[in-house]
Amino acid sequence: MSSVAKVIEIIASSEKSFEDAVEKGVEKASESLKDITGAWVQDQSVKVKDGKVTKYRVVLKVTFVVK
């Protein structure tokens, strides 16, 4: 039996780290998407204020199986 997958793009952020932003993004996506099979980071950026990193942002491509 073959399956069909769909890829969507989401943006997530964290005040802690890139890794935390990824985890938050996948966790939030899994609230409304079932059968997530993977995610990859397309882009990373930070927000800076007064010379300090204040926010980490990631653009994720999330893959899930369409039933």
Image (tube, helix red, strand yellow):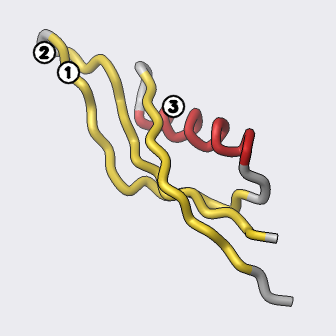
Q: Position of residue 48 (x, y in %)?
A: 20, 21
* Secondary structure type for disc 2: loop
Which residue in the structure is indicated by mark 2? 51
* Secondary structure type for disc 1: strand
Q: Residue 32 has which mark?
A: none
Q: Residues within 10 Å of mark 1 (few under 14, many from 20)?
A: few
Which residue in the structure is indicated by mark 3? 20
Q: In percent of the image, x 27 and y 38: which residue is there?
A: 45
* Secondary structure type for disc 3: helix
Horizontal arrangement in the rendering, residue 58 relative to residue 6 (left or right): left
Q: Quadrant of the N terminus?
A: bottom right
- View extreme (bottom): residue: 1
Q: In percent of the image, x 49 and y 47: which residue is there?
A: 10
Whether residue 20 is situated above or below residue 48 in the rendered picture:
below
Q: In percent of the image, x 25 and y 25: which residue is there?
A: 47
Mark 3 vs mark 1, CA separation in Å: 17 Å
Mark 2 vs mark 1, CA separation in Å: 6 Å
**What amino acid is labelled 1 in the image?**
Val
Which residue in the structure is indicated by mark 1? 48
Determine whether label 2 and label 1 are within 8 Å by CB.
Answer: yes
Whether residue 27 is situated above or below residue 33 in the rendered picture:
above
Horizontal arrangement in the rendering, residue 25 relative to residue 65 (left or right): left
Q: Position of residue 39 (x, y in %)?
A: 56, 57
Q: Residues within 10 Å of mark 2 (few under 14, many from 20)?
A: few
- View extreme (top): residue: 50
Whether residue 21 is situated above or below residue 9 in the rendered picture:
above
Q: Residues within 10 Å of mark 3 (few under 14, many from 20)?
A: some
Q: Earlier in the sequence, mark 3 or mark 2?
A: 3
Q: Position of residue 33 (x, y in %)?
A: 72, 51
Image depth: mark 3 or mark 1 in front: 1
Q: Quadrant of residue 17?
A: top left
